[in-house]
Image: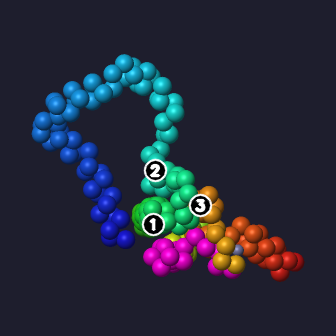
Amino acid sequence: MAATRSKKTTSKTGSKAKPAEKAAGPDKKKATARKAAGGGAARKKAAPKDAQPKRPLKPTERIAPYQPKKGEEYMSDAQREHFRQLLLAWKRELMEEVDRTVHHMQDEASNFPDPNDRASQESEFSIELRTRDRERKLLRKIESTLKAVETSDYGYCESCGAEIGIRRLEARPTATLCIDCKTLDEIRERQKGK
Ligand SMILES: [Zn+2]
């Protein structure tokens, strides 16, 4: 957790590095950038304003879906590396979320001297604790999936051995069952519940 905290501070101070960069000699860079942009610069400036998302992209959203080459074997080294990066980015994201939850609870803890406020605050805490519990479970799952990536077990159904498939893994990088086995599993779960 200390690691994510220190990361936060570096990202905050990150903007301070800019003036130094400018002083280092940006003239050449600017000139080439202008040249490269050419006539498209004006068009580019106008269009993407609405398209740009309001919040910064999450690390996992910045990783584009894998495009396999023609005839590329399933779970090639490049594919496994892609999913490893995706899982690592997801892990970082989750750890930052856990960090935020902890900070939020610490900040709020001393803020409500009124007992009524404290009661509503406690129910809010129990929700946050449940969220953290879920996050922790997910983190464990990501960890075990990362281990599977290392041992080349990744991408194959635990139950029948079939290929889980890149598209399914892209949507659920921690999937350990193919869609057929997963569907069967869910039907069985539902029947147990009745
Ligand atoms: Zn299966």
Q: Which residue is mark 3?
A: 166
Instruction: Mark yes or no: residue 51 visible.
Output: yes
Question: Looking at the image, in which quadrant does ligand 1 appear?
Answer: bottom right
Residue 115 on the magenta span: no
Residue 165 vs residue 98: left or right?
right
Depicted 11 relative to depicted 187: above or below:
above
Q: Which residue is mark 1?
A: 77
| Amino acid type, mark 1 | Asp
Q: Which mark is residue 62?
A: 2
| Amino acid type, mark 3 | Ile
| Dot 1: element | helix
The verdict on label 1 being within 8 Å of ligand 1 is: no
| Residue range (magenta) | 144-159
Which x, y percent locates residue 37? 33, 26
At horizontal 54% and vertical 73% (from top left) the residue drawn is 154
Compare residues 66 and 27 and report the one nearer the observer.
Answer: 66
Which x, y percent locates residue 126? 59, 71
Residue 153 on the magenta span: yes
Instruction: Mark yes or no: residue 90 visible.
Output: no
Which x, y percent locates residue 81? 44, 64
